[in-house]
Image: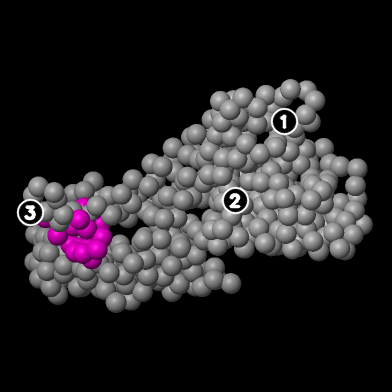
């Protein structure tokens, strides 16, 4: 272990490896995902210190040069965070000191690891919510594109998993599209909500320097300041929980979509054929072709939900920084890694699957026209309850025309005959800017 930045060499603080290992936890591994954000924030902090004259221009240039070398080396794999460091924050200072001597230590003037980690995490969450928004928008775009190609294909609609009414591929596709448009919007709203800079709040009480917090926040692309230093710490975990709840809405919809696909690919339904690369074989049964990808996509929500529970459980804390807050990082990073990885597979899967039109058409039976029949009678003035009984007793004639008519006549807004995808498309387009 390198020299600890907080070690004062005179009090015999513990450096027992077992204790240090426990304190570090997974930090080194996790901080690899945060390091570029930490470096970005460190550079903005240096520019802030220069602005108020704490660092000379020369010092600031040298520190910025050092930070940029670290960034390049880390991105190219030449420099790695390893267990000789306590965490990513102290590694930055230690690398700078190695390169620039005592000047390296000046990077930490007026900041604490408490605001350093908080700002890195906010930048990380903004980045991941941006990804999430784009993936959700891509998923919705692919689904709407397929509505325009396959929207009219008839297939049975189910409630209770029992045949209900004739429905269409379009209604199913547009239903999932609307879900992901909602999710993309949630990502945008949450991004805006947490787009505030905690940098410059230091350990949670402010510092005796006129830090140009606004300028530094702007430099980092934040929309505003997180003003109160205590709240900068108290909001840790809370904003993570909110980011996870957006992810969780996405993976909940992913789970339902994957469930549908898994059902539709069964021998019994046979509505859908998945692209070969999303399926695997069996090690023993030569006849098998299994939809493993959709099954594991269905499992992603479990990881996210587990992370939400883990994170919420940590947050039983008094005000101010507590080391427990470190334990909010593993569930956040784990869930976003798995969630984004799974969601990113959906556009390809949704573009590539094939409808089995014959099986879809055959899933519609004459009984399923009864609701249309009852409503037709009611339209002619028969009280609905009487029409309902009449329709139950009279079997309608089933043929392709009757099915097409049933779908075309479903003109209530959003229904099979009037999907109103232009409303969905407009919402999607307004997200792009
Ligand atoms: N790894 C720590 C965390 O995530 C960094 C902050 C450490 N601060 C401290 N006062 N020990 O919270």
Residue 246 sits above or below residue 65 on the image: above
Q: Is residue 232 left or right of residue 168?
A: right
Whether residue 122 can be seen here: no
Q: Residue at x 50, y 40 (%)?
A: 331
Q: Residues within 10 Å of mark 3 (few under 14, many from 20)?
A: few
Mark 1, mark 3: which one is toward the viewer? 3
Q: Residue at x 55, y 62 (%)?
A: 76
Numbered disc 3: secondary structure: loop
Which disc is residue 215 wearing? Answer: none
Numbered disc 2: secondary structure: helix
Label 1 sits on residue: 319
Mark 1, mark 2: which one is toward the viewer? 2
Q: Is residue 331 left or right of residue 104?
A: left
Which tag, 1 or 2, sits closer to the chain's start?
Answer: 2
| Relative image position of residue 149 (x, y in whole percent) | 29, 77
Q: Residue at x 88, y 63 (%)?
A: 57
State which region is magenta.
261-280
Residue 227 sits above or below residue 280 on the image: above
Whether residue 152 can be seen here: yes
Label 2 sits on residue: 34
Spatial separation of the CA atoms under disc 1 and disc 3: 60 Å
Ligand 1 neighbours mark 2 (CB distance < 8 Å): no
Label 3 sits on residue: 286
């Amino acid at each position: 272990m390198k020299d600890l930045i907080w070690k004062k060499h005179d009090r015999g603080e513990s450096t027992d490896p077992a204790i240090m290992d426990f304190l570090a936890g997974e930090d080194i591994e996790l901080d690899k995902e945060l390091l570029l954000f930490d470096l970005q924030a460190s550079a903005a902090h240096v520019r802030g210190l220069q602005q108020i004259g704490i660092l000379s221009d020369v010092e600031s240039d040298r520190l910025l040069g050092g930070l940029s070398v670290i960034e390049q080396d880390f991105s190219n794999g030449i420099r790695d965070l390893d267990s000789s460091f306590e965490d990513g924050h102290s590694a930055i200072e230690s690398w700078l000191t190695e390169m620039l001597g005592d000047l390296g230590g000046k990077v930490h003037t007026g900041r604490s690891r408490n605001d350093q980690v908080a700002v890195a995490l906010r930048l990380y969450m903004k980045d991941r919510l941006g990804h999430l928004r784009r993936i959700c928008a891509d998923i919705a775009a692919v689904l709407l594109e397929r509505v325009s190609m396959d929207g009219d294909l008839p297939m049975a609609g189910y409630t209770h998993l029992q045949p209900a009414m004739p429905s269409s591929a379009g209604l199913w596709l547009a239903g999932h599209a609307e879900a992901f448009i909602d999710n993309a919007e949630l990502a945008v709203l949450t991004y805006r909500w947490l787009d505030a800079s905690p940098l410059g709040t230091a350990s949670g009480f402010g510092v005796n320097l006129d830090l140009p917090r606004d300028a530094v926040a702007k430099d980092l692309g934040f929309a505003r300041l997180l003003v109160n230093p205590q709240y900068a710490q108290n909001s840790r975990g809370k904003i993570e929980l909110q980011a996870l709840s957006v992810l969780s809405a996405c993976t909940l919809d992913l789970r339902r979509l994957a469930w549908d696909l898994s059902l539709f690919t069964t021998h019994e339904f046979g509505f859908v054929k998945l692209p070969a690369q999303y399926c695997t074989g069996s090690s023993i049964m030569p006849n098998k072709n299994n939809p493993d990808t959709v099954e594991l996509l269905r499992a992603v929500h479990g990881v996210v939900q587990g992370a939400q529970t883990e994170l919420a459980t940590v947050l039983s804390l008094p005000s101010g920084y507590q080391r427990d807050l470190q334990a909010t990082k593993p569930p956040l990073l784990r869930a976003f890694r798995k969630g984004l990885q799974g969601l990113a597979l959906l556009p390809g899967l949704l573009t590539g699957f094939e409808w089995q039109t014959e099986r879809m058409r055959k899933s519609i039976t004459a009984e399923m026209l009864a609701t249309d029949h009852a409503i037709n009678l009611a339209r002619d003035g028969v009280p609905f309850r009487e029409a309902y009984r009449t329709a139950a007793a009279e079997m309608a004639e089933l043929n392709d025309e009757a099915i097409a008519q049933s779908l075309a006549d479903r003109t209530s807004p959003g229904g099979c005959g009037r999907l109103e995808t232009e409303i969905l498309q407009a919402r999607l387009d307004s997200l792009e800017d």
